Image (cartoon, helix red, strand yellow):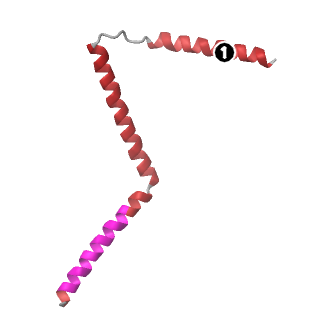
Amino acid sequence: MTQPEIQQEIEQTREQLGMTVEELVAKADIRARARDKAAEVKARAQDQVAELTRWARRNQVVQLRWPLAVTAAGLALAAYAATWRRRET
């Protein structure tokens, strides 16, 4: 091998090593991986909500009235808590 060929091979090896190190650092960055996964799950959930919303509109489904549902859930929880306290005494 000639000197320029050796030099070129060294440069290629350095580039490959740099890419390998970057890949290893990316795999070791758990926070970034968790953020990416969370963003992926959030996007998938948003897509599903949009799809369900389109389906509900096409099928003229009556929308749930959230204040009423939250109030009912709160009352049910309060009743359960009161019953549970009576059993404790």
Q: Is residue 62 above or below residue 54?
A: above
Which residue is found at the position 45% from the left and 51% from the top? 31
Q: Is residue 58 above or below residue 46?
A: above
Place residue 14 in its image quadrant: bottom left
How many numbered badges does the structure rendering display? 1
Residue 9 position in % (x across, y down): 23, 80
> Label 1 is placed on what type of residue?
Tyr
- The residue at the far bottom in this view is 2
16 is within the stretch colored magenta: yes
Which residue is found at the position 71% from the left and 13% from the top? 83
Residue 71 position in % (x across, y down): 54, 11
Report the side of 71 relative to 88 (left or right): left
Which secondary structure class fits the magenta region best? helix
Which residue is found at the position 28% from the left and 20% from the top? 54
Q: What range of the chain is rendered magenta?
A: 5-23
57 is within the stretch colored magenta: no
Label 1 sits on residue = 80
Image quarter where the N terminus lies is bottom left
